[in-house]
Amino acid sequence: MARGKAQNKRMITHVWHYLSENGPQTSQDISDWYNVKVRESSGANYGCDCRSLSAVLSSSILFGTVGTRICNTGAGNKGKYNVYEARPLNDIVDRALKSRRPIHKFPQFVRKAIQERIDDV
């Protein structure tokens, strides 16, 4: 059975709340924070590396790229990392409705916001 973006909903939810509270961060900073958070919690979530996290964030409508930052890697090399920010919830709902994707593809908090917007109309 193929695994798709549905496997990333939990991670996307945690990262969106983290970025909305703490502001823009590099993908390296986000993956470090997320891996520490995963170690503190229990469950079937095994963390992520910087590249896979960056791939998920760049393809999600919940996040935007602010720019790039050059950071030192663990091996002492310099690497270029994207800086991501959390988009406002109203902007996410607008983009989700324009995309015409099924609502169940989005995380729970986005689904609730979409449903509220649909109920208001």
Image (cartoon, grey):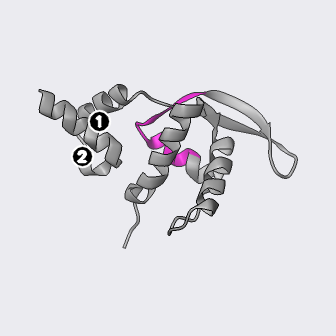
Q: Position of residue 28 (x, y in %)?
A: 68, 44
Q: First in sequence: mark 1 or mark 2?
A: 1
Q: Position of residue 45 (x, y in %)?
A: 52, 64
Q: Inspect the magenta stretch and tell me whether residue 61 lies in it.
A: yes
Please say if 109 is above or below 119: below
- At 49% from the left and 39% from the top, the residue drawn is 17
- At 34% from the left and 43% from the top, the residue drawn is 109
Pointer 2 local density, CA inside 10 Å: few below 14, some 14–19, many at least 20: some
Between the residue at mark 1 and the residue at mark 2, the CA separation in whole angstroms equals: 8 Å
Q: Which residues are magenta?
A: 54-66
Amino acid marked by disc 1: Ala
Residue 38 marker: none
- At 76% from the left and 33% from the top, the residue drawn is 70
Q: Secondary structure at mark 1?
A: helix
Q: Inspect the magenta stretch and tell me whether residue 38 lies in it.
A: no
Q: Secondary structure at mark 2?
A: helix
Q: Which residue is under mark 1?
A: 96
Q: Position of residue 9 (x, y in %)?
A: 41, 53
Amino acid marked by disc 2: Ile
Q: Position of residue 25 (x, y in %)?
A: 63, 34
Residue 18 location, quadrant: top right
